[in-house]
Image (spheres, grey):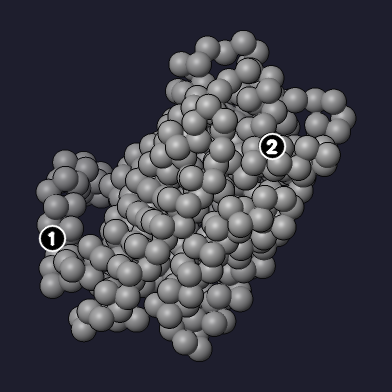
């Protein structure tokens, strides 16, 4: 009887948590994960920012700091992800996905102090950074080489899906009379199925043994030493190329984040006769971000990643100038379309380029690049709000963002001349 009971429990458990190993299914679960930890964990703040500022009566300066503290968390998260042992990828991914969902739902708490807001957004940023890198690593390593390029594009499309979902969710609930707190709660509740799906793609556990446990403790003890050795070997002979590409990536993060943080706020300022213009513009960003990755991937196959990245950088710098040249809808919608078209592609191209510099240390180099991008994202909102002044005019911030992208373009041209770099 006990044996029958054990069999029944095993059957019920397998029914509740099926094992998913289909590559297409894993790619779409990765898409869902990116939508949750990036679309909600990071960019839902952009969609709800005008309502947050109105309901809580916070200034543009505080809004900028709330954005930047999240990007500091993203920086810390990228650093943490670099130290996660390969065998612990799924466990760490699941843990930080749970934290991402919880921090999203915590913003329903009424009358929170500003300190608590900063703390929650910091932890949410850490969760986004860790989960984004580890989900990418886990998903891409689960794909066969012949299907990797197509299905990895599906995975990264989750960023655009999440941005679009954040705009639609915010729009619908504002129309129904709800505010940012309920929007964040509903976003968190709609993220809960991800945790079940992550459990379903749990990799098979190796048989535990005393030697395995000893090795695990030993490797944890030597993590820092191993990291220093790996870092030295990763950049040896490629220092200038890595430095140029990383510096350009700092400026890419700095360049896009002004629009990615304040675009709906700019819309509410300028398009006063259109009640939900900011959310419609933010939806445009998400839709174009979803469509862009396969487009730029196909172009990169024809002309190479570096030429594609150079073109995207020029296009994004042009997009940053549109709201300066055209004060109305044309400038804002044009900026939104170009932002969506370019920023995911720039991420994809840069990570591919830095990985190809030294493929044996691709995870480490991708982690370094992500740190550089996060640094630019942290600085961007602070510079923008400092330049906005009492009138909350974002034109100066957009101009500096465009200038930063042009400097990044020069660095990319110098990077392209490096003979040791594989494009």
- Mark 2 packing: few (<14 Cα in 10 Å), some, or many (20+)? some
Q: Picture quarter containing residue 409?
A: bottom left
Q: Picture quarter containing residue 214?
A: top left
Q: Residue placed at 13% from the left, 60% from the top? A: 232
- Residue 267 position in % (x across, y down): 69, 43
In the image shown, does 186 or 49 lie closer to the viewer? 49
Q: Picture quarter containing residue 73?
A: top left
Q: Residue placed at 33% from the left, 42% from the top? A: 80
* In the rendered image, the vertical position of residue 92 relative to residue 242, given as above or below: above
In the image shown, does 250 or 129 lie closer to the viewer? 250
Q: Is residue 386 visible?
A: yes
Residue 269 marker: 2
- In the rendered image, the quadrant that contains the C terminus is bottom left
Q: Residue placed at 75% from the left, 25% from the top? A: 179
Residue 232 marker: 1
- Residue 328 position in % (x across, y down): 72, 50
Circle 1 sits in a helix, a strand or a loop, which is it? helix
- Mark 1 packing: few (<14 Cα in 10 Å), some, or many (20+)? few
> In screen coordinates, is 422 left or right of 142?
left
Callout in the foreground (1, 2): 2
- Residue 132 position in % (x across, y down): 48, 50
| CA distance separating discs 1 and 2 | 49 Å
| Residue sitting farthest toward the bottom | 302
Q: Is residue 161 visible?
A: no
- Residue 341 position in % (x across, y down): 60, 65
């Amino acid at each position: 009887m006990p044996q029958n009971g054990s069999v029944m429990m095993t059957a019920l458990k397998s029914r509740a948590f099926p094992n998913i190993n289909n590559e297409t299914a894993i790619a779409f679960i990765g898409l869902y994960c990116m939508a949750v930890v990036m679309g909600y964990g990071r960019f839902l703040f952009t969609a709800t920012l005008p309502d947050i500022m109105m309901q809580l009566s916070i200034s543009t300066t505080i809004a900028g700091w709330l954005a930047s503290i999240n990007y500091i968390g993203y920086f810390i998260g990228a650093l943490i992800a670099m130290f996660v042992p390969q065998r612990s990828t799924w466990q760490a991914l699941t843990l930080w996905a749970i934290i991402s969902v919880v921090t999203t739902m915590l913003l329903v708490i009424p009358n929170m102090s500003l300190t608590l807001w900063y703390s929650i957004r910091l932890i949410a940023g850490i969760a986004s950074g860790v989960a984004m890198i580890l989900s990418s690593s886990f998903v891409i390593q689960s794909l066969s080489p012949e299907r990797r390029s197509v299905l990895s594009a599906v995975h990264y499309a989750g960023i655009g899906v999440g941005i679009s979902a954040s705009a639609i969710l915010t729009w619908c609930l504002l129309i129904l009379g709800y505010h940012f707190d309920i929007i964040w709660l509903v976003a968190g509740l709609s993220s809960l199925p991800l945790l079940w799906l992550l459990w379903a793609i749990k990799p098979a556990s190796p048989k535990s043994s005393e030697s395995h446990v000893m090795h695990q403790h030993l490797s944890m003890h030597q993590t820092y030493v191993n990291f220093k050795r790996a870092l030295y070997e990763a950049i040896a002979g490629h220092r200038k190329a890595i430095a140029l590409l990383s510096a350009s990536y700092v400026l890419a993060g700095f360049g896009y984040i002004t629009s990615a943080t304040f675009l709906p706020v700019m819309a509410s300022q300028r398009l006063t006769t259109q009640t939900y213009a900011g959310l419609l513009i933010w939806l445009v960003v998400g839709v174009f971000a979803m469509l862009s990755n396969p487009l730029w991937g196909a172009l990169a196959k024809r002309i190479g990643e570096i030429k594609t990245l150079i073109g995207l950088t020029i296009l994004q710098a042009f997009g940053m100038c549109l709201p300066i040249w055209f004060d109305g809808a044309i400038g804002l919608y044009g900026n939104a379309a170009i932002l969506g078209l370019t920023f995911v592609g720039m991420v994809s191209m840069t990570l591919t380029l830095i990985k190809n510099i030294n493929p044996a240390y691709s995870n480490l180099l991708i982690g370094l690049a992500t740190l550089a991008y996060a640094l630019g994202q942290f600085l961007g909102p602070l510079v923008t709000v400092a330049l906005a002044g009492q009138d909350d005019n974002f034109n100066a911030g957009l101009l500096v963002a465009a200038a930063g992208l042009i400097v990044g373009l020069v660095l990319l041209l110098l990077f392209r001349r490096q003979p040791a770099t594989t494009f």
